[in-house]
Image (tube, helix red, strand yellow):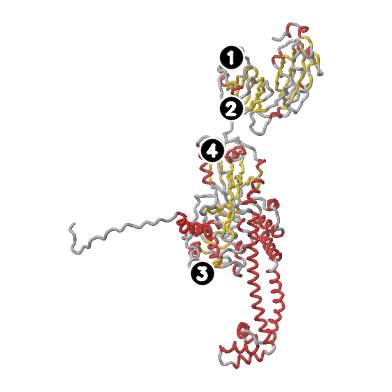
Amino acid sequence: MPKKKNDKPAEPLVPAVIQDQPITETIEKNYMPYVMTVIVARAIPEIDGFKPSHRKLLYTMYKMGLLTGARTKSANVVGQTMRLNPHGDMAIYETMVRLTRGNEALLHPFVDSKGSFGKQYSRDMAFAAPRYTEVKLDPFCAEIFGGIDKDAVEMVPNYDNTMQEPSLLPTSFPNVLVSPNTGIAVGLQSNICSFNLAEICDGTIALLKNPATTVDKLMDIIVAPDFAGGANLIYDREQMKKIYETGSGSFRLRARYAFDKQKSCIEILQIPYSTSIEIILKRIMDLVKEGKIKEITDVRDEIDLSGFKLTLDVRRGTDPDALMARLYKLTTLEDTFACNFNVLIDKTPRLLGIRSILLEWIRFRMRCVRRELTYDLGKKQDKLHLLRGLGKILLDIDKAIRIVRETEKEADVVPRLMEGFTIDEIQAEYIAEIKLRHLNREYIIERIREIESLQKEIADLEATIGDDLRVKELIIKQLQQIKKKYGKPRKTQIIYADDIPEVPDEEPTESYAVYVVLTKEGYFKKITRQSLRVADEQKLKDGDEIANAEETDNTAELLFFTDKAQVYKAKVDDFDTTKASALGDYIPAKLGMEDDEHPVMMKALKEYNENHHMIFLFANGKGVRVPVTAYETKNNRKKLTGAFSDASPVVAVIYEGGEPMDLLLVNSADKGILLSSDLISVKTTRSSQGITLFTMKDTFDVTDVRYGHSLAAMEGVQKLRKNKVPATGIALSTLGEQMKLE
């Protein structure tokens, strides 16, 4: 492109000058002011329980006359609030939404609302635009603005210095612990849960009466947090005490539900404050898709005008308590609320416990009450001053009238009254403004009579302002009135961790009939009925034989008694089904038994019945019955030591199912006795040896025990029966060939 005639040559580029600046200086000048602004003027609540955005909004509504007037469009309030809070209309409106009755986030809402404001328990239920909704201040707000027009708190300029706003609101109750608050600043976070208003009032009164009230005493008064959404709080006193003392800690909330047996559905009516219905719905549907929850057939959000409801349709026969216990572990139907009670005290962030917060609020409230009383005192002193001036003209009313009438210029009336009655300008101005009809003795005397009562009131106010106890008495009366007027029963109910049964995360065991077999060599098989129909013959190792075999259910529990006086517990479901033609699982290895330890008896139990027993027969001729309940454990213990006495080798372990059974005991001298099991004493102690059953020489031992089918097949065995123990044996050889034992 040709160069134009008037083109000037381009100026040479001047390289930028780069100056070194220490990072510490950059942070101090640029970052720290931002940090302090976020902490002090945005994210962290102060002792009145409000962040600046809340305070500016509520004060604007108060100045708009919305405490007593009719509702107005939310858009109107948002626009007016921007005079104090220039952060954008939507930010202001979102702040308002959370304070409304319709949003259900607060135990005691500050804004009476009309229209759709969403719900605290739903992230997708959106609020309507501000042009559609209407608001006014709830009557409850009278308790946060009382005394604000009497200089109860300091007023400061707004952001452009065109109007005044309160630095704090003179809340007449500890709102900082009644309204939940969450804020994230820079390197600092606050998460304050809500407490019951009535309990907070009682706890504050206790501290006002006795500042030395301990945390333990406060915990008896302020039981636990209380949330607008209700739910159950799992109470742990030690955890709660930590929160009350330090302001930091956590507790668990779990949903409340009801079971409709007729419709076969679980209705979840309240959920933890820290979660939402959408999170719960998605998690439950994922569990159903993954096959981890098989009992649920449908999940529905049934929130309507009557309130929250999440419905789970379940299969017939489902145990609702067991299902909910699993859902508590797998979803946010049970959730943790982490407390972090960071509060601004005199513009300084501090992490405080409940007791410390209440003491700081008492200090703040006493200051507010004193400022309010001082305002009233000043008004009464001003009135007394005027009445004293009025008293002086009582001495000569005609003179006052004459001064006013004879004064040519209006501007000279006040100076001449001051001169004529020796009063100051304020008093003279007041007298000059009295209507002509009131310039009579009766009116003036009536006004002067007020002087005595005013003097008493002034003296009383001065005494109250100077006396901490009297100021505290005023605060106590206010708290008692607030509790009576606004106190409500707890919404969040208390349950205790010890009362909650432990439920495993895995899905419930499928119930079906199985056949279980234990061999003398220690091999175990779980066989289904179908497999038994195909092949009834059991495959065993050479020289092995079946020790125990029985039909049971896949949900039953197995007890394996060993030759080292121990019992190992397992679920039938822990083993894979196999065929009769397989050898099965080797139990010592499967259950992790000790070296040279072998199972001697197996029993499958679906329940532990106190009338059922385990019979232990020992080589020394002793025996004992132990209730099976002695082997029941609340937790999932896999091994019990001291399952029975090890003083003598165990010869037989037999299960007695509630009815007496015949037992044949044979010793090494080939002698035997037949006795009924009810002759054996019952001992609740597992390690007991019981009583002597078989009397014999020390050189002999019991070597064999027969019962059940093997006993019924023996002819002439009744000749060995003994009706008392201990008993001596009868030689089997004297009874014939049929009594010889194989």
Residue wearing tag 4: 297
Answer whether labels 2 and 3 touch (C-beta < 8 Å).
no
Q: Quadrant of the C terminus?
A: top right
Residue wearing tag 1: 541
Residue wearing tag 2: 574
Mark 4 and mark 2: Cα distance apart in space:
27 Å
Answer whether labels 2 and 1 touch (C-beta < 8 Å).
no
Sequence order check, earlier mark of 3 and 1: 3
At a point 61% along the width and 84% down the height, the residue shown is: 425
Answer whether labels 1 and 4 touch (C-beta < 8 Å).
no
Residue 64 seen from this side:
no
Left or right: 662, with 121 as reference point: right
Nearest-to-viewer mark from 4 and 2: 2
Mark 3 and mark 4: Cα distance apart in space:
61 Å
* Disc 2 packing (10 Å; few <14; some 14–19; many ≥20): few
Residue wearing tag 3: 163
Q: Nearer the viewer, residue 541 or 344?
A: 344
Sequence order check, earlier mark of 1 and 4: 4
Sequence order check, earlier mark of 2 and 1: 1
